[in-house]
Image (cartoon, rainbow, N blue to C red):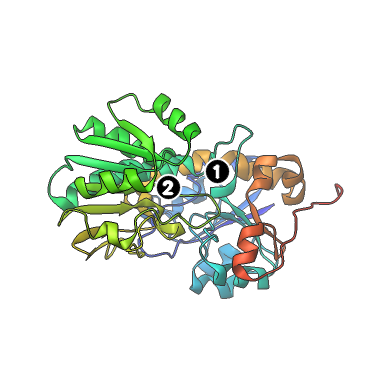
Amino acid sequence: MRLGIPLEVKEGERRLALEPEAVEALVADGHRVAVARGAGAGIGMTDEVYRAAGASVVEPAQAWNAELVVKVKEIQAEELPGLAPGVAIFGFHQLGNDPALTRALAARGVTAIAYEMVRAADGRYPLLEPMSAIAGSLAIAIAAQVLGKDAGSVLVLGAGSAGIEAARVAAHGGARVTLLTRTRASLERARDAVDLPVDLGIVSPETLEHHVPRVDLVVGAAAIAGAPTPKLLPRSLVKRMRRGAMIVDIAIDGGGVAETSRMTSHADPTYVEEGVIHYCVPNMPAADPRRATQALSRAVLPFARELASRGIARALRESSALAAGVLLWRGQVTHREIAARAGLPYTALSMGEPA
C-alpha cells in the first residue's frame, strides 16, 4: 500500500504521526511510505533519517498522493484542496464540534478514521490516551509557568487519562487536589488510578459551586469522544473565581468545559476573561513534540500496519477497534451524532463481503 505522512500545518504543531523506526517497520512489511519534506523538523528528525528508514521524501503536496494518509491533527482549511477523492485519512479528526469540516470531507469522498474514536474491547481509547496523559501533565506545568508559582489548590474536571495525570502531577507537587467526574464507575477507576492524596467526587451544580470559587486552577478534562464537551462552568461561576485564577481547558477541541473558553494557539495561548486566565490550546502535546511523537508513533504503528497489510476495508471488517474509529466511509457519515450536527444523512458502517 502507498502511505503518506504529510507536513503538519496547524499552528504550533510539531508532532509527527510516525517516527523513523515505525516507517522502517512499514517498509519492511512491503509498503511504500512517502514523507513530506521537512515533516520531521519539529522533532529533530531530518529528511535523511527518513530516507535511511526506507521512505521516499517528497514535496509536501505529493505526500497526499497515497491510499492511506497517516497524520496528527485534523484537516486544516489549506489542506482541503489537496485531498484526493476517496483518500483514507488516519489521524485526530475532532469532527464532533466542526460540522463545516465534516461537510467538506464528505464532499470529497474521504474515509476518516479518527484516533480519538478507536476503541479497544476493554473500552479504552489506545490512541487518545497517551496524548491525553501528556496534556494532563503539561496542564500543571503550564499553569505554574503562567501563574509564576505552583497552584496551591487545583480542581480537575474529568477522570480520563488527562484528568488523572493532571491530578497525579498536581498532588505530587504538593497541591490540594479535588477531582470530580460524572459517573460512579469513572470515580472508582480514578480511585484505583491515583495513588496520591486526592479528594474525589461527582460533578454536580452543588459540588462545582463549592469548589470552583476556592481554587487557584481548574483543569478542564471532561471530554467526550466524538461529542461536544459538556459546559460545566457557566460564565456566572467563572465570574466568582479568584481574580488571577486560571482555567487550563484541555477539552477545548470539543468546545471546552467553560462558557468563557475559546480556542487559542501556542503562539498566543492565554487571555483573561472575568478576571480569570484561560489557556485553551487544542494541541497541547505539541509543546513536548519529541515525547509526544514517540508515544503517538508507538500507539499508531500497530493499527497502521493492520490497515496497510490487510487493506482498509478488510482491516475495518476484522478489527472492531478500528471500525469504531470510522467517522466517514467514502464520504458517507457513519457517526450518528456527527451526521446530525453537520446536517448530513447518517449511514451505518457496512464493509460488505470480503473482496
Please name the amino acid that badge 1 sits on: Val
Q: Residue at x 46, y 58 (%)?
A: 254
User: Few, some or many C-alpha atoms within 10 Å of disc 1 (few <14, some 14-19, many ≥20)?
Assistant: many
One can see residue 133 in this view: no
Near-viewer residue (140 or 57) = 140
| Residue 38 point in image, percent of width and height | 43, 60
| Residue 22 point in image, percent of width and height | 53, 42
Q: Residue at x 35, y 36 (%)?
A: 165
In the visual, does 57 lie left or right of 83? left
In the visual, does 331 lie left or right of 40? right
In the visual, does 86 lie left or right of 284? right
User: Few, some or many C-alpha atoms within 10 Å of disc 2 (few <14, some 14-19, many ≥20)?
Assistant: many
Residue beneath disc 2? 222
| Residue 276 point in image, percent of width and height | 21, 59
> Label 2's element?
loop
The mark total stands at 2
> Label 1's element?
helix
Q: Which mark is residue 225?
A: none
Residue beneath disc 1? 300
Q: Answer yes or no: do the residues labelled 1 and 2 have beta carbons within 8 Å?
A: no
